[in-house]
Image: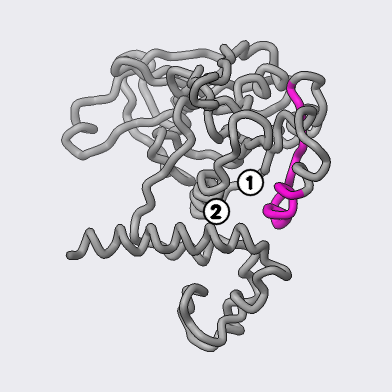
């Protein structure tokens, strides 16, 4: 039979297939071959012996947390508490671009923000689909529901931005615990304990609820400049092939900073570029 892993706890994998849930284990050969099933994997299994037989090819894979075959990411932020970490948002966008999944920027708690604050955030991410919403009054929730259809989606962002509250608004069946903002640190508290994939029949789509979809350490085998949509159509106009758009002269990308490229987002691009460069240097020293 073929099914999809919806949850993995304590060495057991819960697989959804033909409207049933099967509890399976991974065979010993997986460990020898360095194979580890993750939530989202499509697998072949024998329901009689209780073991996964094969993992089908993955469309994509994330590592923190470990999930596979994602098609859409809702990247949630807010201008209210907690204070928005736009460097984190940009890192999440890079990971989504690398995985070739649809990106939706969600500005939550917009009822607590001024029009100017919403506009400022929107300008920085104008190359992406943006949804302004509020889980308190259900504003924007219908648009999120439409986007979930036909996708395996996750909600990512800082703790406390309202991911669980949004999921609860999208589907009452999920009933996720919500957390408060730490008064001392002005940061959110994690409420989700493990990764689980839930199919929502009414929306004809699935949601991955994850405890730590918030930070990534970048590997050195890709160029982050290729993941910035703002640079499209400009890269080939740079003087040097392979321009990093940081220090090179006659760079078409730098020439458009403050115009078609948001200045603040470009400054964070340089910051992430330097972080990746430093990591490479340490690795090869």
181 sits to left or right of 137: left
Q: Mark 1 highlights which residue?
A: 103
Across and down, in percent, residue 16 comes to 50, 20
Across and down, in percent, residue 79 comes to 68, 37
Sequence-first disc among 2 and 1:
2
From this view, report whether residue 114 is shown above or below residue 202: below
> In the image shown, does 267 or 217 lie closer to the viewer?
267
193 sits to left or right of 104: left
Helix, strand or loop at label 2? It is helix
**Most distant residue in the front direction:** 184
Task: Give the number of the disc on residue 97.
Answer: 2
> In the image shown, does 59 or 82 lie closer to the viewer?
82
Q: Residue at x 66, y 11 (%)?
A: 173
Q: Residue at x 65, y 70 (%)?
A: 257
Tell me where the magenta segment starts and ends, as one range. Answer: 120-135
Across and down, in percent, residue 149 comes to 71, 33
Q: Residue at x 37, y 25 (%)?
A: 45
Q: Residue at x 54, y 26 (%)?
A: 186
Helix, strand or loop at label 1? It is strand
């Amino acid at each position: 039979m073929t099914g999809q892993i919806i949850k993995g706890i304590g060495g057991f994998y819960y697989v959804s297939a033909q409207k049933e849930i099967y509890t399976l284990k991974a065979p010993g050969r997986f460990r020898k071959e360095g194979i580890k099933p993750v939530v989202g994997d499509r697998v072949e299994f024998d329901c009689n012996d209780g073991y996964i037989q094969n993992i089908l090819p993955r469309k994509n894979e994330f590592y923190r947390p470990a999930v596979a075959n994602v098609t859409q990411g809702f990247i949630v932020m807010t201008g209210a508490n907690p204070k928005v970490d736009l460097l984190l948002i940009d890192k999440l966008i890079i990971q989504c671009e690398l995985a070739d999944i649809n990106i939706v920027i969600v500005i939550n708690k917009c009822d607590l923000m001024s029009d100017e604050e919403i506009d400022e955030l929107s300008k920085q991410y104008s190359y992406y689909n943006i949804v302004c919403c509020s889980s308190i009054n259900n504003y924007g929730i219908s648009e999120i529901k439409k986007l979930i259809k036909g996708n395996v989606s996750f909600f990512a962002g800082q703790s406390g931005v309202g991911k669980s509250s949004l999921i609860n608004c999208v589907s009452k069946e999920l009933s996720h615990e919500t957390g408060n903002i730490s008064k001392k640190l002005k940061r959110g508290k994690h409420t989700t304990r493990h990764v689980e994939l839930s199919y929502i029949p009414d929306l004809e789509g699935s949601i991955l609820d994850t405890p730590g979809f918030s930070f990534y350490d970048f590997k050195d085998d890709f160029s982050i400049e290729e993941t910035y949509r703002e640079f499209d159509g400009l890269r080939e106009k740079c003087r040097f092939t392979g321009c990093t758009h940081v220090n090179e002269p006659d760079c078409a990308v730098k020439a458009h900073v403050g115009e078609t490229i948001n200045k603040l987002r470009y400054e964070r691009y340089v910051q992430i570029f330097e972080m990746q460069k430093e990591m490479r240097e340490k690795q090869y020293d």
